[in-house]
Amino acid sequence: MKQFSSADLKKLRGLAHHLNPVVWLGQQGITEALVKATDEALLSHELIKIKFVDHKDEVKALAEELAQKTVAVVAGVIGHIAILYREHPEAEKRKIKV
């Protein structure tokens, strides 16, 4: 996985500012279904927001765990929302250049 500088992560957070959450993490925590939904969202969007409805005291740890399971990078955590980024595997379908 590519290493991202703090400037890269800042750029990703800026790009994510206007996005709405596409994945919600509820009381069941990280399940197989949540990992699959996150993986599909990353494949189609590259940059996504995840809203933490429950487990609000563990946002950073759970965001890191979810990023690890989906081979993504945590661009940032703001309040109860985590921002994840994963480059599209096909170069011609990439929407974001970092």
Image (cartoon, grey):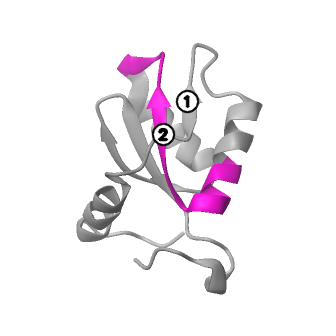
Q: How many marks?
A: 2
Viewer-side residue, 92 vs 27? 92
Mark 1 → mark 2, Cα distance in angstroms: 7 Å
Answer whether residue 50 is magenta in the image.
Answer: yes
User: Vertical placement of 50 versus 95: above or below?
Assistant: above
Quarter of the image where the C terminus is located? bottom left
| Residue in the picture at 31% in, 51% down | 17
Please tell me in which quadrant of the rendered image residue 46 appears: bottom right
Q: Is residue 3 left or right of residue 23?
A: left
| Residue in the picture at 41% in, 50% down | 19
Position in image of residue 78 (x %, y %): 29, 38
The residue that label 1 is drawn on is 24
Quarter of the image where the N terminus is located? bottom right
Viewer-side residue, 38 vs 93? 93
The amino acid sitting under disc 2 is Pro
User: Vertical placement of 5 versus 33: above or below?
Assistant: below
The amino acid sitting under disc 1 is Trp
Q: Secondary structure at mark 1?
A: strand
Q: Is residue 60 left or right of residue 36?
A: left
Outermost residue, bottom direction? 92
The boundaries of the magenta stretch are: 39-57
Q: Is residue 13 left or right of residue 68?
A: left
| Residue in the picture at 64% in, 44% down | 38
User: Vertical placement of 87 versus 73: above or below?
Assistant: below
Position in image of residue 12 (x %, y %): 35, 62
Please tell me in which quadrant of the rendered image residue 37 appears: top right
Q: Secondary structure at mark 2?
A: loop
Numbered tag placed on residue 3 in the rendering: none
| Residue in the picture at 55% in, 29% down | 24
Q: Circle 2: is it few (<14), some (14-19), or many (20+) Cα within 10 Å? A: some
Numbered tag placed on residue 21 in the rendering: 2
**Circle 1/circle 2 CB separation < 8 Å:** yes
